[in-house]
Image (tube, helix red, strand yellow):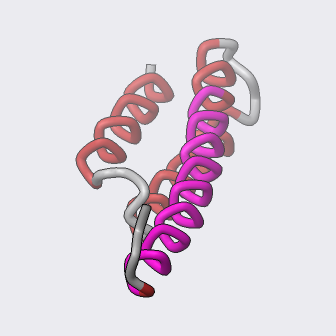
């Protein structure tokens, strides 16, 4: 167990961030999955769903939740599937 004040504070900060990151990662996964199903199902709002997923990915990158190359890869994949 931590025995300094700064270490105890660090533990609390890390836990808060872990929970926040987990929630954001879940939102990203949901948005990407929704966009993917909309594109494969030829839904009329597929472009909007892809746009929403791209926004979620960009937001996560800016907050440091996921790596920028991971987001770029996912965005590229969605754009390619939308173009087909």
For the record, the magenta segment spans 6-33
Compare residues 17 and 4 and report the one nearer the observer: 4
Quarter holding the C terminus is: top left
Q: Residue at x 52, y 56 (%)?
A: 18
Quarter holding the N terminus is: bottom left
Q: Residue at x 36, y 46 (%)?
A: 71
In the image, taking residue 57 as reference, residue 40 lies left or right, namely right
Compare residues 2 and 71 and report the one nearer the observer: 2
Q: Position of residue 75 (x, y in %)?
A: 40, 41
- Residue 56: quadrant of the picture: bottom right
Compare residues 28 and 35 and report the one nearer the observer: 28
Q: Position of residue 23 (x, y in %)?
A: 64, 50
Residue 16 drawn in magenta:
yes
Q: Residue at x 65, y 19 (%)?
A: 37
In this rendering, the answer to whether 61 lies above or below 5 is above
Outermost top residue: 41
In the image, taking residue 43 as reference, residue 67 lies left or right, namely left
Q: Residue at x 74, y 23 (%)?
A: 43
> How many numbered badges does the structure rendering display?
0
Residue 84 drawn in magenta:
no
In the image, taking residue 19 as reference, residue 67 lies left or right, namely left
């Amino acid at each position: 167990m931590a025995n300094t004040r700064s270490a105890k504070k660090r533990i609390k900060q890390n836990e808060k961030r872990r929970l926040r990151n987990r929630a954001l990662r879940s939102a990203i996964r949901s948005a990407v999955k929704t966009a993917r199903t909309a594109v494969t199902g030829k839904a009329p709002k597929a472009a909007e769903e892809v746009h929403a997923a791209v926004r979620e990915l960009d937001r996560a990158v800016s907050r440091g939740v996921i790596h920028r190359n991971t987001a770029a890869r996912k965005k590229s994949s969605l754009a390619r599937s939308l173009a087909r």
